[in-house]
Amino acid sequence: MATALVPFMAQSLSNPGYDAIFRPAFLLHNMSEGGACIGSALREKDPEKRAEIFSLAIGCIFAGFLGCHYGGISNFHLKNILYAPIAGKYITLKDIGDGVFSEGMLGQGCGIIPESGIVLLPVNGEVVSIADSLHAIG
């Protein structure tokens, strides 16, 4: 059922730019599951099962309190949309200090002067390399 809602979530993220309905509803659903897990764990006699059920409750309830957040649809490919991998100021390739990038040897692109240390994958894919200087991700 959640997959059926993906087009509507994508539309919300596109216009008005945030999702005020679907993802919050999923969060409430997870909180409810966490509560059910706590209730089950309190009734469970087997210590191993109880520990496992409590760990599920923590995942359901406390992820938001531990800094997890949602900024886009990462598990679904959105055609012709490329999200910036990090918040910051956009700069042209010519303004990048690295000659390989600024001369366009690796193709077209842009630079971003980061505002935070959080980097997201802008498309569906896999990180296969990170430069030792941490200035480039492949």
Image (cartoon, grey):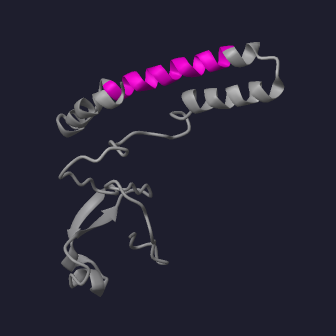
Q: In this rendering, would 73 be left or right of 131?
A: left
| Magenta stretch: helix, strand or loop mostly | helix
Residue range in magenta is 22-39
Q: In this rendering, would 76 be left or right of 117?
A: left
When the figure is inspected, residue 8 is found, relative to residue 82, above or below; the finding is above
Q: Quadrant of residue 104?
A: bottom left
Q: Residue at x 75, y 29 (%)?
A: 51
User: Residue 33 location, x and y as percent?
Assistant: 55, 20
* Location of the N terminus (image quadrant): top left
User: Residue 23 location, x and y as percent?
Assistant: 36, 29
Q: Residue at x 19, y 39 (%)?
A: 14
When the figure is inspected, residue 91 is found, relative to residue 44, above or below; the finding is below
Q: In this rendering, would 88 be left or right of 134?
A: left
Q: Residue at x 54, y 35 (%)?
A: 63
Q: Residue at x 45, y 72 (%)?
A: 129
Judging depth in this view, the residue of 126 and 106 nearest the camera is 126
Determine if the magenta segment contains residue 9: no
User: Residue 106 location, x and y as percent?
Assistant: 26, 80
